[in-house]
Image (cartoon, grey):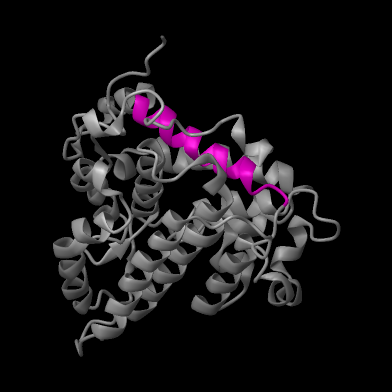
């Protein structure tokens, strides 16, 4: 996986031994719009975007069915997500008058809130146990808001931050990169889609038809990277139902398109205007670069999203160290 190693996420086991690090419970630091400057200059921002771009490079040109190494830590993360999936089955939606925002989600979330540290402890080795409360906060933040019963790109970012933290303490390593996206993040997407369908969750801060997608962004970035230099699938093909049906199991981007068409009715150009526009871009490389720019502008630089982001010792608010 040499192509991804250039930007490998920092592994704190190489510099600060994680066992001696002072872990803290992450908290909000972005309270007003002017605080956004602190975020963009922060170590957390640099590490987060570096992590996203490293994985983007790692999955370039590879199908979901590509053979890759699956470590014990990856297997444990999948088992954690399988537990969340099982809890959905054990918590059926309630009968209620309103169509959206089924209150049974609050029962499901309360279980996660209670068990998050125990779940994370199954993934983190005992000598790193001190990190568990800090890392578990990002897992709890990654599944949606239990008050509003909504889900959006800020929650998705919390899951990426959760994975980034596991890299920083050395639980996940450089040679886990492909499995992080294809096995763990893909399983996370499946569980989130099941949550969204089961509890009819509202999109958090949706821009409606003018947003890329009601719920996700990262699988479009990594999914477009997968398709770079594909011998015959071009961006124009993702609005072709036949092409999507035949190839969605190999490519995250097409799986997202399939989910949108299952959930929405009417012409694609009307319910997903931004994506329709992207289908006119000539190459997947240009799509990928454009989506990274869009992600920074529409998610990472938007106060309504980042005001909820939490900062601790692993993703700190302090400015990037230049040494």
Q: Classify 92 as above or below 160.
A: below
> Between 191 and 116, which is closer to the camera in this rendering?
116
**Residue located 51% across and 51% down the image:** 218
- Residue farthest along the top direction in this orientation: 323
Q: In this image, 255 relative to 228: left or right?
A: left
Query: Which residues lie in the magenta part?
Result: 43-61
User: Residue 30 lies in what quarter of the image?
Assistant: top left
Drawn side of residue 136 relative to residue 301, left or right = left
Residue under the image location 56 percent in, 44 percent down? 175
**Residue at the (63%, 56%) spot, across then down:** 68
x%, y% of residue 321? 37, 15
Seen from the viewer's position, the closer of residues 254 and 201 is 254
User: Where is the C terminus found, in terms of image quarters?
Assistant: top left
Q: Principal SS element in the magenta part?
A: helix
**Image vertical order of residue 254 relative to residue 173, above or below:** below
**Residue 14, image x and y in percent?**
41, 27
Is 91 left, or right, of 245 in this rendering?
left
Q: Is residue 147 visible?
A: no
């Amino acid at each position: 996986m040499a192509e991804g190693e250039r930007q490998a996420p920092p592994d704190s086991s190489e510099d600060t031994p994680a066992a001696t690090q002072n872990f803290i419970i992450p908290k909000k630091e972005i309270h007003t719009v002017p605080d956004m400057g602190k975020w963009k200059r922060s170590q957390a921002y640099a590490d987060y975007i570096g992590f996203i771009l490293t994985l983007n490079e790692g999955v370039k040109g590879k199908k979901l069915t590509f053979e890759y190494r699956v470590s014990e830590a990856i297997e444990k993360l999948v088992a954690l997500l399988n537990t969340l999936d099982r809890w959905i089955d054990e918590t059926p939606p309630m009968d209620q008058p309103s169509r959206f925002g089924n209150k049974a989600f609050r029962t499901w979330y309360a279980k996660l809130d209670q068990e998050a540290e125990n779940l994370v402890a199954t993934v983190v080795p005992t000598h790193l146990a001190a990190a568990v409360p800090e890392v578990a906060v990002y897992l709890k933040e990654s599944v949606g808001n239990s008050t509003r019963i909504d889900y959006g790109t800020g929650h998705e970012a919390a899951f990426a931050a959760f994975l980034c933290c596991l890299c920083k303490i050395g639980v996940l390593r450089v040679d886990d990169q492909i499995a992080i996206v294809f096995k763990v993040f893909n399983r996370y997407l499946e569980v989130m889609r099941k949550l969204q369908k089961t509890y009819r969750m509202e999109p958090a801060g949706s821009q409606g038809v003018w947003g890329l997608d009601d719920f996700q962004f990262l699988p479009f970035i990594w999914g477009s990277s997968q398709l770079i230099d594909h011998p015959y699938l071009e961006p124009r093909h993702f609005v072709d139902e036949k092409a999507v049906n035949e190839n969605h199991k190999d490519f995250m981007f097409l799986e997202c398109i399939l989910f949108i068409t299952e959930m929405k009715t009417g012409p694609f150009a009307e319910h997903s205007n931004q994506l329709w526009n992207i289908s006119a871009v000539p190459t997947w490389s240009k799509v990928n670069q454009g989506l990274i720019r869009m992600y920074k502008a529409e998610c990472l630089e938007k106060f309504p999203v980042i005001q909820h982001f939490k900062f601790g010792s692993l993703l700190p608010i302090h400015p990037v160290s230049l040494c």
